[in-house]
Amino acid sequence: MPEGLTSKDFNVNNRKNTIDDLGRSGYDPDDLDELENTAKELTDTRREIRDTSARIGEVGGEKYLAEQGTPVLDEWAIDNNKDLNNGTVPGGYTDGASRSAPDKDGHSSDFYIEEYKGADARTSSREVQTHHENMAKQGSDAYARDHLLTDPRFAQYFHDHPRLWEDI
């Protein structure tokens, strides 16, 4: 690593400028090629770790819901959404959704919106930008409302299940 630089200088957003600056400063072109290749490999590895962590959270979340007697609804099941975003749920979409088991009259009183967490297993304490609610903390009412408005699967699900819409 060149003196005075950090891995952040070689991330996907800064890499080109950093390499160009080093080239103008007289760094050997072969060393710069090696640095650039290493930086690209690091970016790819971090992406793979992030995606693996997300997958762990999704699989664990679905297993937990099933164990609680509120299995994830088919419309949100991981295996039914592989085409959305390289196998993971895109931003603005809800990780999972489930409903309470219908009572003897066929009514469900509860509908759950799930936020699966990967390897770090924590909901962010920072507010995040939402599409319709400005800034909101993960897990807050505003965050859930934003997902209800942003994820098109909700509108379709409640259209297909009007009784549940009325029940909740």
Image (cartoon, helix red, strand yellow):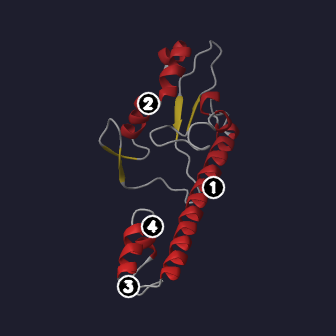
Label 4 belongs to which residue? 11
**Could you give the CA–CA distance between mark 4 and mark 3, rounded to whole angstroms?**
15 Å
Say which element carries label 2.
helix
Reading the image, the residue beneath label 1 is: 52
- Which label's residue is closer to the chain start, 1 or 2? 1
Q: Residues within 10 Å of mark 1 (few under 14, many from 20)?
A: some
- Which quadrant holds residue 139? top left
N-terminal of the two: label 4 or label 3? 3
In the rendered view, would you say 20 is above or below 45? below
Q: Position of residue 4 (x, y in %)?
A: 38, 85
Q: CA distance from mark 3 to mark 2?
A: 46 Å
**In the image, what residue type sits under mark 1?**
Thr
Under tag 1, what secondary structure? helix
Q: CA distance from mark 1 to mark 3?
A: 32 Å
Question: Considering the numbered disc 3 on the image, is that residue within a helix, a strand or a loop?
Answer: loop
Residue hosting label 3: 4
Residue 66 position within the rendered picture, expressed as x and y whole percent measured from the top left? 69, 37
Q: Is residue 161 visible?
A: no
Foreground of the two, 109 or 40: 40
- Front of the two marks 4 and 2: 4
User: Does 139 sit left or right of 69 as displayed?
Assistant: left
x and y, in percent, of residue 72 in the image = 63, 34
Mark 2 and mark 1 in contact (Cβ < 8 Å)? no
Q: CA distance from mark 4 to mark 2?
A: 34 Å
Whichever of callouts 1 and 4 sits on the residue coming sooner in the sequence is 4
Name which residue lies at 39% across and 42% down.
Answer: 140
